[in-house]
Amino acid sequence: MTSAAVALVSNEVTIASIQAHLDREIDDLIASLPDPGQLSAAERRGVIARYSAVLEGNFIYWMTGAYISAGSDQARAKIMDNLREEVRDCHPGMMRRFAIAAAGSPTDADAQAVSRDLMKVRLFIGRLEAVPIVVTMAFFEGFIQRFMPYLADLAQRQGSTEMEYTDVHGVCDITHTQELFRALEAEMTLAPRTSAAEMFEGVNLLRTLIRTIVFGN
């Protein structure tokens, strides 16, 4: 837990203060990404494959956990809109096409590389605690939006022209992030006061998982 996170919850927590904290976390992650031009083809493939191994089979599960845990009708409605779009437009299929076109289909080794950190996120979601989960998903949607140009760059350097996944998520996740913060506001009116460790536990777990996706260890 960073000192900024502790300070954030030491007084009254606001949506704006949570969003500012998550923005800083995302800024730090984006700044840490290696230069695509300095990566080998194998390293580029690894990032795409590990990202696909995590996202294709887990994002809808995570968002479903957010829906099940939500106590307010407003939050459920906003999360359901996100889930409906994921299923209706077959976002896992977009992810699969993107990975195949960039020669980044996950192997057993790719799945194994992310397995431990991914399981920690799955177990966190499985506790069905609304506020921490919605904070985590808002963080992730915000990160994905910022990460899409980088992911597209990796794929293009792999010779791919299949960019539907990155094009769609670079735009739709802006709205998804905003809606999740509205859902969070509704849930925070129902939930008891949440400690810093509780509120940002999922963010910390997901940040570690993202670093494993990018760096492979």
Image: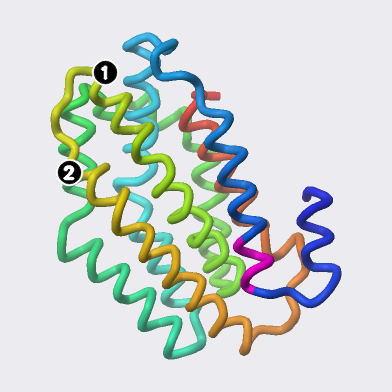
Q: Which residue is depicted at the point 16% across and 65% down? A: 88
Where does the image place residue 204, in percent across and percent down from the top left?
Answer: 64, 49
Where does the image place residue 212, in percent across and percent down from the top left?
Answer: 52, 31
First in residue order: circle 2 vs circle 1: 1
Q: Quadrant of the C terminus?
A: top right
Circle 1 residues within 10 Å: few <14, some 14–19, many ≥20: some
Quick one: SS at disc 2?
Answer: helix
Quick one: SS at disc 1?
Answer: helix
User: Would you name the residue on which mark 2 appears?
Assistant: 164
User: Would you name the residue on which mark 1 appears?
Assistant: 157
Where does the image place residue 208, in percent across and percent down from the top left?
Answer: 59, 39
Magenta region: 15-19
Vertical arrangement, residue 90 with respect to residue 40, above or below: below
Name the image quarter holding residue 20: bottom right
Query: What kind of colouring is applied to the model shown?
Result: rainbow
Vertical arrangement, residue 36 with respect to residue 113, above or below: above
